[in-house]
Image (cartoon, rainbow, N blue to C red):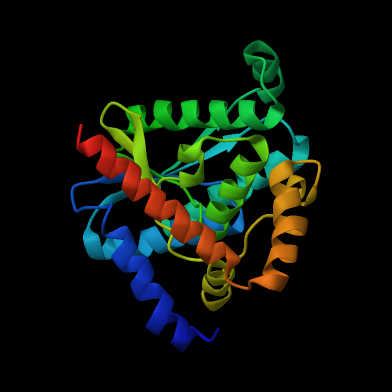
Amino acid sequence: MTKKSFEASVLPRMRAFSSQFIKRADSVLVGFSGGPDSVCLLHFLNYLSKEKHFELAALHVNHSLRGADALADQKFCKNFCAALDIPFFTQKIAVRPLAKKWNLSIEHAARKGRYQAFAAVAKKWGASKVALGHHLDDQAETVLLNILRGTKAKGLCGIPARRPLAEGVEIIRPLLCVTRAEVEAYLKNNFLSFVTDQTNSDDAYTRNWIRHRLLPLMKEKQPQIQAHLAAMAQELQDLFEGKNAGR
């Protein structure tokens, strides 16, 4: 996708979608891993903040799982934020002890610890929103993951575009309107570098297996499977919200 076509088609969609969640008076804390999705998100919100006049900062969480590689990622994130003059925070959590304490898998303990860090830093900095870099492909993967694990109908709603995190703070996901390919186009068109977490290639994690094996097979039969799953998730979210509003 050329830069001209991207700016004419995808960028307006990103701006319109984000305007649902971010207002002039907001202070937005971005969960910043340094991976492609979070680099795209932070760079885009930095551009948008100049137009919408909201405060922006970034938080990098070190899960204490990858040693020197994790420290290198943290350094990349710090330098990226310094180059854009974005306030930068770090939090280190010991995921393995937490997994044992909470009787959770490493993956689930990392997520729980990460969200606790988001809430703590959001309160400290005064954020009204915590922005995360999930995109449309992540939505499709989450729906399939929930099906494989066994879920009630609400699990088919996938990832909400916004939800409460703590008192006065909500999580928002401004990239749910774009695909992984469109995120990659954004990075290419803006000459942005990023870090790669090697655990993302390990198919021992069910989400990675879905991404690398299951979805490619499904795409052979239906190339728009991600969009279809995401649309179904959104429709179910709307139905559940409507049902709850009627109570």
**100 lies left or right of 57:** right
**213 lies left or right of 53:** right
Please provide percent x and percent y for residue 202: 80, 47
Quarter holding the N terminus is bottom right
Q: Is residue 69 visible?
A: yes
Compared to residue 192, the image places residue 246 above or below, namely above
Nearer the observer, 223 or 4 = 223
Q: Residue furthest top?
A: 101
> Residue at 75% of width from left, 36% of height from top?
66
Please provide percent x and percent y for residue 204: 81, 41
**40 lies left or right of 65:** left
Quarter holding the C terminus is top left
- In the rendered image, which quarter is residue 19 located in? bottom left
> Residue at 37% of width from left, 59% of height from top?
46
> Residue at 72% of width from left, 72% of height from top?
220
Please provide percent x and percent y for residue 35: 61, 54
Compared to residue 136, the image places residue 168 above or below, namely above
Q: Is residue 197 visible?
A: no
Nearer the observer, 136 or 35 = 136
- In the rendered image, which quarter is residue 57 located in? top left
Compared to residue 194, the image places residue 62 above or below, namely above
- In the rendered image, which quarter is residue 4 located in? bottom left
Please count the marks in the image: 0
> Residue at 66% of width from left, 46% of height from top?
73
Please provide percent x and percent y for residue 184: 59, 69
